[in-house]
């Protein structure tokens, strides 16, 4: 019997190509949604390619999760995410998601 392990498989997204977005207050991420994924905490997060070609993964934050669902964010959407820090009332991370509506 022959056995293989994870080392025997190529990873579809080279970890060097995927950056985790860890914003400071006021930071924005703008780019094209490459994937909408559900993480280990059952919250949706986005994989976004910015205009310079860097691919970013957002956090699995409840507020961002619900905005992704409500706005029906999908692969190919052009989005802007703004980080506003932690909310005083519940200490939750405050993200604001915007979707390009295609109108100028």
Image: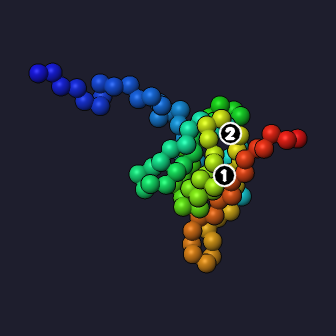
Residue beneath the point at 88% across and 41% down: 104
Quadrant that contains the N terminus = top left
Q: Position of residue 91 (x, y in %)?
A: 57, 72
Earlier along the polypeptide chain: callout 1 or callout 2?
1
Q: Residue furthest bottom?
A: 89
Quadrant position of residue 100: top right
Work out whether 71 lies above or below 14. Answer: below
Give the labeled residue for mark 2.
77
Give the labeled residue for mark 1.
71
Give the crowd class for mark 1: few <14, some 14-19, many >=20 residues within 10 Å: few
Q: Position of residue 79 (x, y in %)?
A: 70, 44
| Residue at disc 2, secondary structure | loop
Real-space CA distance between mark 1 and mark 2, rounded to the nearest whole angstrom: 11 Å
| Residue at disc 1, secondary structure | loop
Q: Nearer the viewer, residue 8 or 104?
A: 104
Answer yes or no: is residue 54 visible.
yes
Residue 13 left/right relative to 5? right
Residue 43 left/right relative to 82? left
Residue 28 left/right relative to 86? right
Answer yes or no: is residue 27 visible.
no
Work out whether 6 lies above or below 37. Answer: above
Residue beneath the point at 71% across and 40% down: 78
Residue beneath the point at 63% across and 71% down: 87
Residue beneath the point at 38% across and 25% down: 10
Q: Position of residue 65 (x, y in %)?
A: 56, 56
Q: Nearer the viewer, residue 86 or 45?
A: 45
Q: Position of residue 67 (x, y in %)?
A: 63, 56
Give the crowd class for mark 2: few <14, some 14-19, many >=20 residues within 10 Å: some
């Amino acid at each position: 019997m022959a056995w293989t392990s994870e080392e025997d498989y190529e990873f579809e997204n080279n970890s060097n190509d995927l950056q985790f977005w860890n914003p400071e207050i006021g930071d924005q991420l703008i780019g094209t949604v490459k994937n909408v994924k559900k993480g280990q905490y059952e919250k949706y997060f986005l994989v976004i390619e910015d205009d310079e070609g860097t691919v970013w993964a957002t956090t699995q934050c409840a507020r961002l999760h619900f905005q992704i669902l409500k706005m029906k964010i999908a692969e190919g959407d052009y989005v802007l995410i703004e980080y506003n820090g932690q909310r005083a009332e519940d200490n939750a991370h405050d993200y604001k998601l915007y979707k390009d509506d295609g109108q100028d």
